[in-house]
Amino acid sequence: MTRFDLLLVGGRVVDPLNGLDERVDLGIADGKIKAVKSGIDPRTADKVIGLAGKTIIPGVIDSHMHAERVGYRMMAKVGVVTGVDFSERMDIICENVRSHGSGMNVATLTNVRAYDTAPGTRVDRREIERIVKRAVEDGALGVKITGGHNQFTPDTTGKIIEIANQHRSYVAFHVGTTATSSNLPGLKEAIELAGDNHLHVAHVNSYLRGLTRDPIEESLEGLNALSGKRNIVSESYLAIINGTGGKCTRGIPDSGVTRNCLRLRKYPETQKGLEKAILEGFAMVQVEVGGECVLVSGQEGVRLWKDSKTDIGISFPVNVPASTFLCATRKDKSGRFIVDGISTDGGSIPRNVSVTSGLALVRYGALTFEEFVRKVTVNPAKMYGMLSKGHLGEGADADITVLDLERGEAVMAIAKGKLIMINGVVVGEGGTIVTTKAGAKSVENAGLKTDIVDLEESTFFHK
Ligand SMILES: [Zn+2]
């Protein structure tokens, strides 16, 4: 008889990929789902958890986040089991996962600028090839282009997309080049620069904040431009606050996004303008308090920003609810979601709301519960070729998020068969790195467990 390490009994299991929505028990052993049926004998398990009245879904996957150190706990706390980090170098990720991972699964896209070998607006082909190869060998799934904050020329941006595709590695783009910005024209340019190449367009909602005209018109036009593009995958987030940098050089904010935010509320696009925005509460400084990140404005915010010589994270309440709503819910003519996933772009920024705000959309009637599950776990899993995630069939990873639909939040998270969060208390430690065959050795050398994915099985390459 099969012996289980963990048995979950009495919960409603919703697993769209396997067409399951009923009360069944889940038997877990060796980090995998081993049995999905009702009436499993509790004596066959070392540990039994009763989940009557609760809803069990495949572990939530945040398809775009920035964990730094504190973000893992902040994500696990709200039921996220797997996250894809969009910035750091793999050696930093490995160190942070070991010390702060909270038991999560973590994949990475390395910022093209992370190795400090591409500081300018142009990078030559050989250097791009070196960066892409190094990122993948270090254990990342591919690279991320931070266009909007710190632009490359259109030519260099196009080359990065092309070279990543030639190497069959993942490439995500925060849109914007020296010719555009982090806005609707930038989004359209990104689609053009991709051509027939595969591309992940990051946080679609953030280009549709009304910088060029009415944000609803912008949203409809931007989503229309993305509609039917089978070579492009994308996500959007639901939070009102964004995340950017406060660093200023010679009196001007470095980040194009920060300057855009100031412009939106008619503040001068200068260090003085940013100071006024922090003082008046429009800009909020990200500060670590008690192992989590919180937002501070007013005089205290200005002091913290100045103490860090302006080099500190900043958030502005600039996302338009109507835009985030349209990005999360809009479908094309064939009934497919135009934007594949709901992400957070959070982690260490306090806006990990894909579950709470996603469930609010369900209560509102804008998404069915099954669609919510598709957007927060099924589609993100497919996007990155994580075939053993995003569903709860026998043999799948025992990655599970348990929801209390009355409270509208996650109450338990399980990663690879181990409890990582119970009622908002994070109990997981360390973590697993989701990588490709090419990066496994380097991650194992760093002393971390790996989950191997093959991007040829992803919707990134085959949508
Ligand atoms: Zn991001």
Image (tube, helix red, strand yellow):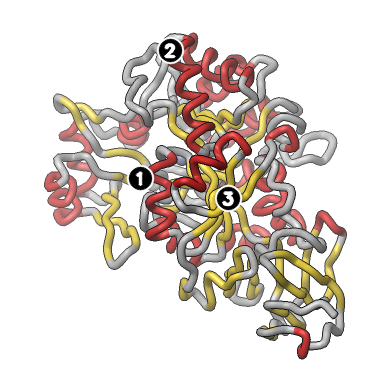
Foreground: disc 2 or disc 3: 3
Above or below, 414 relative to 328: below
Q: Residue furthest bottom?
A: 43
Q: Nearer the viewer, residue 238 or 263?
A: 238
Amino acid type at circle 3 is Thr
Q: Is residue 50 above or below residue 176?
A: below
CA separation, marks 2 and 1? Answer: 27 Å
Graded by Cα atoms within 10 Å as few (under 14), some (14 to 19) or many (20 or more), the crowding at tag 1 reads: many
Residue matched to label 2: 153
What label does residue 316 carry, if any? Answer: 1
- The quarter of the image holding the C terminus is top right
In the rendered image, the vertical position of residue 217 relative to residue 2, given as above or below: above
Residue drawn at point x = 78 percent, y = 65 percent: 14
* Residue that mark 3 sits on: 450
- Can residue 329 be spotted in the picture? no
Give the amino acid type for the residue marked by disc 1 in the picture.
Answer: Phe
